[in-house]
């Protein structure tokens, strides 16, 4: 039996075992019936890694063509995420934005994430009338915004956004792995797993590492002696933006 506070998306059965309930379209449908449309769901991927950008997505689902199997990206296999990514892109309005390591260093990870989420909303083909965003914080948008804790497991539009953000970021990190072999970006996507920490210790940080995160800062100090610090150029930033948007 699972004890303690129920998790978002969990429902208690007759036997007292918490079952995972898939996200629903209830919030979007209620707004639609009140004449509030389009409604966008927003989520991000990549707050925790030591390298790479935060990637944010905004999605307006077509009520008549909602892909089957939408769920919190963390509950899905990579193969299922990839398949749903293509379906979402083919049936919905969407936009993807990113906050670079330089933005994260300048603003801190929370503010950079919220900035990227707002940027994704503004990049939608049509400005939504209402935004549903995963988490505790509302976004700086010209329309109403509702923060939903655990929203990626509760709200279909947010779940769709979580899939777009996750797949977009994973693809980006695999591309960066080609430019920076030896770090294993294609495997761990920049998270601080032992293999990544070992590579940081041996090779030092790349321009895509987040220098204010403790393990990166330590590796930077170790490898900075006797070398010239390398900054991300405008050209590199543009390339990252193109990869993230592809």
Image (cartoon, grey):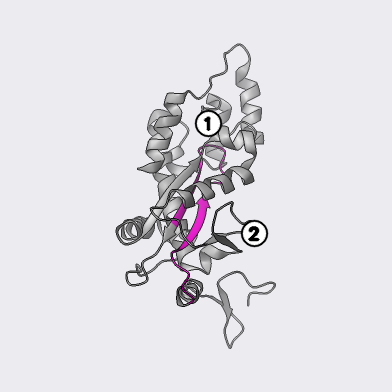
Is residue 9 among what the camera can see? yes
Q: Is residue 22 left or right of residue 213?
A: left
Q: Residue beneath label 1, please?
A: 199
Q: Which residues are magenta?
A: 34-58
Residue 136's disc number? 2
Residue at position x 62%, y 34% in the image = 105
Point 50% across, 25% down: residue: 232
Do tag 1 and tag 2 residues touch (Cβ < 8 Å)? Answer: no
Where is residue 158? Give x, y as percent. Answer: 49, 62
Asked which secondary structure carries label 1, the reply is helix
Q: Does 201 sit left or right of 184 as displayed?
A: right
Residue at x-position 45% and y-position 30%: 237
Q: Residue furthest left?
A: 90
In terms of secondary structure, where does tag 2 sit? loop
Give the mark, 1 or 2, whose residue is nearer the N terminus. 2
In the rendered view, tell whether residue 143 sits above or below residue 11.
Answer: above
Relative to 223, 90 lies left or right:
left
Q: CA distance from mark 1 to mark 2?
A: 34 Å
Q: What is the count of numbered marks?
A: 2
Specify the farthest residue to the bottom: 14
Question: Outermost residue toward the right?
Answer: 4
Q: State the image coordinates of residue 123 (x, y, percent, origin top left).
A: 43, 48
Which one is in front, 66 or 205? 66
Residue 189, visible in the rendered structure: no
35 lies above or below 242:
below
Residue ID at (65%, 33%)? 212
Q: Quadrant of the C terminus?
A: top left
Task: Name the residue nearer the viewer: 166 or 115.
Answer: 115
Q: Determine crowd level at label 2: few under 14, some 14-19, many 20+ residues with C-alpha closer than 10 A.
A: few
* Residue 25 image offset from top left, x and y in percent: 46, 73
């Amino acid at each position: 039996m699972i004890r303690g506070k129920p998790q978002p998306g969990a429902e208690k059965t007759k036997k007292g075992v918490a079952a995972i309930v898939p996200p629903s379209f209830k919030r979007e449908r209620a707004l639609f019936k009140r004449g509030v449309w389009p409604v966008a769901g927003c989520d991000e991927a990549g707050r925790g890694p030591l390298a790479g950008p935060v990637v944010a997505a905004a999605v307006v689902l077509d009520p008549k063509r909602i892909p089957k199997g939408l769920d919190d990206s963390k509950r899905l296999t990579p193969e299922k995420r990839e398949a749903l990514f293509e379906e979402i892109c083919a049936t919905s309005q969407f936009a993807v934005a990113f906050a670079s390591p330089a933005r994260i260093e300048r603003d801190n990870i929370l503010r950079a994430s919220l900035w990227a989420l707002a940027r994704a909303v503004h990049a939608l083909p049509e400005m939504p009338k209402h935004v549903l965003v995963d988490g505790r914080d509302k976004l700086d948008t010209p329309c109403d915004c509702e923060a939903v804790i655990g929203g990626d497991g509760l709200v279909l539009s947010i779940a769709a956004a979580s899939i777009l953000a996750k797949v977009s970021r994973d693809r980006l990190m695999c591309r960066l792995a080609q430019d920076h072999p030896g770090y294993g970006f294609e495997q761990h996507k920049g998270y601080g797993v032992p293999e990544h920490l070992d590579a940081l210790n041996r090779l030092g940080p790349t321009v895509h590492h987040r220098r204010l995160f403790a393990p990166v800062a330590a590796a930077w100090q170790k490898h900075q002696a006797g070398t010239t610090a390398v900054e991300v150029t405008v050209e590199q930033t543009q390339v990252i933006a193109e990869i993230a948007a592809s």
